Structures are given as structure tokens and as C-alpha cells.
Image: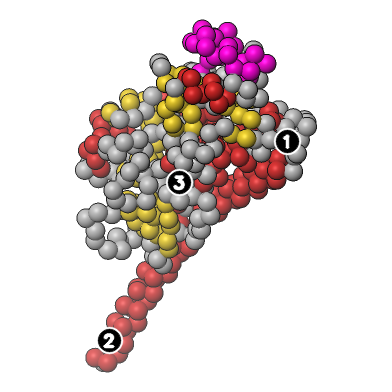
């Protein structure tokens, strides 16, 4: 009799363990799909069976350490203890993001309904997400560097996707102490335009949307590379100047910047391609004039809406051939209903459209029927 009891007990325990293992396996398959990274340099993703590990290596300039995020399915225990890693239960159902560049990623993943809060909602321009702001589904959270903690706690998000330009994370650290996990999106640090778009995989991992993210990314990559190939087959490479004056200094994109990469892939001759910087380079007006007076195109002229407005900001601009020939192009003319710049919101997610815009400007014979999406000629 005693032996029968032991056998039955072992059977029940075995069945219970098997059921728990099967449940864990099902959750792992559903929410921890494998991912690979092709272009992005700022983060890595590794699968470890029952959990996923994401490391953000460059969350901000000159970062002294990497950030580690451990994703495990809801209903499962943390795979291990750690004082440095941030643990996130997936899939996330309620999220706060702090940059407009995150909005298109959520929309491409069909996740905009899960967004519950955003700092300075006037910056949001996308029609779908704008409607959610207007009907009260997305709450105003103040400024990104000084989030309204009280409102954040009331919203009870399961995740906050933040960013920092300087490494100052005090506001996020305060919120994280309440138990709300915070992860940092460093997509803006990427040098390759396609690498920026690939951060959709980072966002997707927290929602179990890896497959959709991969499909979206592959299509954008294909369109970008296809357009670049068309441009490279052209015989001319027009000279390009970029940037503008701020006070007494002209800031031009460095030769290793993502903007310089766009200009290279569009088969143009960027006049400062030899500057080994990922950010901008400060120059005097005289040095810019000496090098770029005869430039054929001026792509990225700042926030001026017309040539006359550009002239009013600095009459010296009239000395450039691009100004005289009216070949000045800006990406800041297209705005949302509340004044947000669509280029800054959607551009990082759609580098293929930016590249096609530039190719259309530099090589109009290549994309004859193409209608530019971001860049417009100043009139």
C-alpha cells in the first residue's frame, strides 16, 4: 500500500513539473523568438532558453558602461538575481516612451494602443498616435528630462523606454526605484541609417513582436540598398554642402555621421566627408565659404522655411552658388498638426525614404516619378 502511495505521489509531482515545464516552454516560444542584428552596433540580443538578454553598449556618447536587460515571460520567475541588470516581464501591455522616434516603431509593430504616456505630446505628429493623444488615451508627462512622476505612477506602465543625450538618468532612476523597469533606446547613436531603423527589433523584443519587426526591417533594408545601387550606377556625383550658422559658427555633419552616409549612398560628393567625426564639426564661415562656395547642392539648411527667411537669418548665405541657383533643400518644412517635425519622428525609422529623397534631388533622372517625402526645395 505504501509503495502504491509513493508511485502515485511521484506521478503527480512528475505531471506537475511537466505541466510547469510545458507552460514555460510555450511562453518562451511565444515571447522570446530568436533575433539577429545586422547593422546596429549599439545593442546585442542573446537568447538563453527561458530568457532573453539585451545589452545596450552605447546608450549615450562616451558611455562608461553597458546596460543589461533581462526579458522573461510573465508568469515565470527571474532566471537569476542581479543588482545591475533590469528585469522585464514580457509581453509588455502598457508602455511609456520618451522620444518621438519610438512612435513609428510602435505603429509599425501595431502597438500604438499600448502607449499610455508621453512627454510633451505636441511633438507627436503621426495621425494614428495623434488621435490617441487627442482622445485622452495617451497622457501628457511633462518634459523628457523631468517626467511627472506622479502621473507616471498613476498610469502604472509596465515599461518605460527612455533616452539620454548626456548620460543623465536621474529622472529615470527615481521612477525605477518604484518598481517600474526603464530601458534606454540608443538608436540615435548609430552611424549607419539602416542601423538606426534596426532598433525596431529592440522595441519589438519587449512585446513579443520579433517576427513583425524582422519583416519590417528587411523591407526597409531592401528598399534602401536597392535605391543606393541605382544611385551608384549614375555617372555624376554632385558636390554637396550641409549645415548652417549658429551665432558665429557653422556646424557641418562629420564624415562618419549618418547624414554623411546618406550623401555617400546617394552618390554625391560631400565636401566634409574627410572629417573623421560622427557628430558635427564647428567651422568658421570663411572656411565654409572657401570650400563650398561652388557647391551644387545645399542639403540640410536648418529650420528656415524659405530662401528669404534663410537670408534674413544671415545675409552671408547669398555668397553661395547653391543659394543663388535655388538648390537649397530642407527637411523641416513638413510638420504635424501641433508643430512637430515629421522628419525627426519618422526619418530614423524610414532611412529608405530619406535616401530616395536625396537621390531624387541629386539624380532626378533616376527616380523620375518619385515624390519626395521629407526634403523640399526652399523657394
Please report contact status of discs 3 and 2: CB closer than 8 Å, yes or no.
no
Tag 3 residue: 203
N-terminal of the two: label 2 or label 1? 2
Residue at 58% of width from left, 48% of height from top? 217
**Horizontally, is 296 left or right of 248 in the view?**
right
- Neighbour class for label 2 at 10 Å: few (<14), some, many (≥20)? few
Asked whether 317 falls inside the magenta stretch, the response is yes
| In this view, 179 is above or below 331 | below
Does the magenta segment cover residue 327? no
Measured in 3D between alpha carbons, the distance from the residue under mark 1 to the one under mark 3, in whole angstroms, is 39 Å
Please determine whether, in this image, residue 8 is positioned above or below residue 155: below
Q: CA distance from mark 3 to mark 2?
A: 51 Å
Query: Marks 2 and 1, how far apart in space?
Result: 86 Å
Name the residue that disc number 2 marks.
5
Q: Nearer the viewer, mark 3 or mark 2?
A: 3
Q: Earlier in the sequence, mark 3 or mark 2?
A: 2
The residue that disc 1 covers is 236
Q: Are marks 1 and 3 in contact (CB under 8 Å)?
A: no
Instruction: In this rendered view, identify the residue nearer to me: 180 or 2.
Output: 180
Q: In the rendering, at what x and y percent does residue 94 appear?
A: 39, 41
Going from N to C along the chain, the mark reached first, 1 or 3, is 3
Residue 365 is situated, as x and y percent measured from the top left of the image, at 78, 32
Q: Which residues are magenta?
A: 303-326
Which x, y percent locates residue 314?
Answer: 49, 11
Amino acid at each position: 500500500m505504501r509503495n502504491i502511495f509513493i508511485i502515485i505521489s511521484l506521478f503527480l509531482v512528475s505531471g506537475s513539473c511537466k505541466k510547469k515545464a510545458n507552460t514555460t516552454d510555450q511562453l518562451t516560444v511565444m515571447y522570446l523568438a530568436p533575433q539577429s542584428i545586422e547593422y546596429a552596433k549599439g545593442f546585442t540580443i542573446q537568447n538563453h532558453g527561458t530568457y532573453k538578454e539585451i545589452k545596450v553598449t552605447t546608450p549615450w556618447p562616451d558611455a562608461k558602461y553597458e546596460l543589461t536587460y533581462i526579458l522573461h515571460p510573465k508568469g515565470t520567475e527571474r532566471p537569476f538575481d542581479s543588482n545591475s541588470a533590469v528585469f522585464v516581464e514580457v509581453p509588455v501591455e502598457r508602455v511609456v516612451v520618451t522620444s518621438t522616434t519610438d512612435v513609428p516603431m510602435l505603429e509599425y509593430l501595431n502597438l500604438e494602443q499600448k502607449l499610455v504616456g508621453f512627454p510633451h505630446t505636441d511633438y507627436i505628429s503621426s495621425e494614428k498616435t495623434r488621435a490617441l493623444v487627442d482622445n485622452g488615451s495617451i497622457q501628457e508627462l511633462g518634459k523628457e528630462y523631468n517626467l511627472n512622476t506622479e502621473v507616471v505612477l498613476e498610469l502604472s506602465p509596465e515599461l518605460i523606454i527612455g533616452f539620454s543625450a548626456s548620460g543623465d538618468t536621474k529622472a529615470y532612476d527615481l521612477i525605477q526605484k518604484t518598481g517600474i523597469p526603464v530601458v534606454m533606446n540608443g538608436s540615435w547613436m548609430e552611424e549607419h541609417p539602416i542601423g538606426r531603423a534596426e532598433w525596431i527589433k529592440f522595441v519589438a523584443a519587449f512585446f513579443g513582436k520579433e517576427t513583425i519587426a524582422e519583416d519590417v526591417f528587411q523591407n526597409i533594408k531592401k528598399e534602401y540598398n536597392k535605391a543606393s545601387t541605382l544611385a551608384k550606377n549614375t555617372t555624376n556625383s554632385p558636390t554637396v554642402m550641409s549645415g548652417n550658422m549658429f551665432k558665429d559658427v557653422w556646424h557641418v555633419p562629420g564624415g562618419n555621421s549618418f547624414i554623411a552616409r546618406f550623401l555617400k549612398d546617394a552618390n554625391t560628393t560631400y565636401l566634409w566627408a574627410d572629417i573623421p567625426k560622427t557628430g558635427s564639426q564647428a567651422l568658421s564661415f570663411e572656411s565654409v565659404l572657401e570650400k563650398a562656395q561652388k557647391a551644387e547642392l545645399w542639403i540640410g539648411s536648418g529650420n528656415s522655411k524659405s530662401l528669404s527667411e534663410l537670408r534674413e537669418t544671415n545675409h552671408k548665405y547669398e555668397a553661395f552658388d547653391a543659394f543663388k541657383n535655388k538648390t537649397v533643400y530642407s527637411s523641416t518644412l513638413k510638420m504635424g498638426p501641433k508643430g512637430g517635425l515629421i522628419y525627426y519622428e519618422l526619418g530614423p525609422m524610414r532611412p529608405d525614404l530619406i535616401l530616395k529623397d536625396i537621390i531624387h534631388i541629386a539624380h532626378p533622372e533616376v527616380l523620375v516619378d518619385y515624390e519626395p517625402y521629407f526634403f523640399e526645395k526652399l523657394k
